[in-house]
Image (spheres, grey):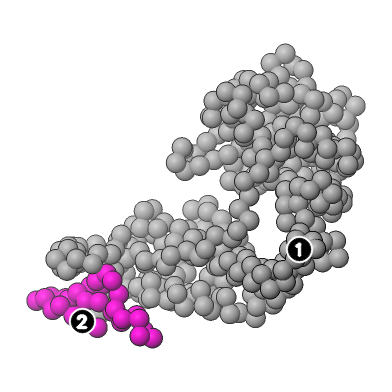
Amino acid sequence: MVQHETSQGWVGKVKLGKGNGESTNYFMWLTVDGQKQRRATKTADLEEANDKLQEWRAQAKIGFRQDTKLRYEELRDDYLASGKTVAASVLRDLDRYFKGMLVSAMGSRLTEFRKWRESSEQVLEYKAESLAKEIELRKLRAGKKADLGKITKDATQWVENGVKATTDKRLVYLRAIVKHAFKVTKKINNADIPHFPILGKQVDNVKQGIFTDQDLENIIAEIPQHERIIRFLHLTGMRSGQAKAITWDMIGEDNVLRMSGFLTKNKEAYSLALTNSKGEAYPATKFMVARKNRNKAYGESVFEVEGLREDWREVCGKLKLGYYNKATRAYRGAELHDFRRTAATNLTNKGVATVNAMTVTGHKTDSMFTRYNIKSLKSQREALDAVS
């Protein structure tokens, strides 16, 4: 490690190990309250690095510094206490690896975390099982022209990329936890945020498809028993899991569907007008506002979805909207979630304002707003009228 000494503290580059030379950017060290601490300068310019060291010295002098005993659990608990949620499997991996670790040490352990997770017994078993299914699926897709060598190579890369993507997801949540400590609780300085390694390659099956009107009718013709939920998803773009959770008691006498935030991905309550401004039901919601259904038992599901997943995969395979190996249950192709993209596209193609369209689909993006609540059913009706 090459150090550039100063009167108080120093900056330098660290060795990357295994003959990879030194880091591109400088790091800085400073002894605070008798304990040596290290921070990333995030610059390869020596003069700028020294300036950041002097800034850190000034901050330390007035008490604005990271608590040297601050550990991962405290940042995690603060994040969760704020109402944020983390998938159980993601939290389990983060807890197993970073439990008890000082925040000041986390930055140097991110690459090791990736190696640790991707070499775990559970992940290795998943990779082996997924690879076998992927090879069979690609052989089915290639037909008589199948090149087993190329198929195996491509399938292996696809599975590897998929595992990298799931590790990336855990690092994304960890980064959010750390940034929450900087932006919200103010427990760390911006310079204390670890430099996260470049995220893994994207998996080669990024979903971009939408359904045409003919696709819709062809699907329904094959599985008419699921027509109600399919037409509803096509109209509203609601997440399929959310739609499956709709029960009759959520539909009020005013023909408005009201769902608790417990059932939505963004944890915010959601309302959806089931009739237009004239009080007329949309074709996809007509059965939902029928008077005869108002006596349904409390908590009874609106949509019958038994066998939907299997039926969906089989029909998509038949209609060439996907590939399905029934023996291995491996599937690649159109998903119910694609109706979400389809609905958004249909709304915008009809000239519906983005804000109005979002009241229908329930989309929420940080770049547009930090918190969004449906305030007017009128704009929803106008949006739905345009595409109905």
In magenta stretch: residue 20: yes
Q: Is the C-beta separation of discs 1 and 2 under 8 Å?
A: no
Q: Splitting the image into 4 quarters, where does residue 27 fall?
A: bottom left
Which residue type does callout 2 highlight?
Val
Nearest to the observer: residue 64 or residue 14? 14
Q: Main secondary structure of the magenta part?
A: loop
Instruction: Give x and y (percent) for residue 105.
Output: 37, 76
- Is residue 340 visible in the rendered structure shown here? no
Residue at x-position 58% and y-position 39%: 363
Q: Residues within 10 Å of mark 2 (few under 14, many from 20)?
A: few
- Is residue 13 visible in the rendered structure shown here? yes
* Residue 193 versus residue 129 in the image, above or below: above
Nearest to the observer: residue 259 or residue 238? 238
Which residue type does callout 1 highlight?
Lys
The C terminus lies in which quarter of the figure? top right
Instruction: Give x and y (percent) for residue 121.
Output: 65, 81
Give the labeled residue for mark 1.
145
Instruction: Give x and y (percent) for residue 157.
Output: 60, 69
What is the C-alpha distance between the residues marked 1 and 2?
Answer: 57 Å
* Residue 274 versus residue 62 in the image, above or below: above
Give the labeled residue for mark 2.
2
The furthest residue to the bottom: 18
In magenta stretch: residue 263: no
Q: Residues within 10 Å of mark 1 (few under 14, many from 20)?
A: few
Instruction: Tell me the magenta residue range.
Output: 1-29
In the image, 7: left or right of 302? left
The furthest residue to the left: 7
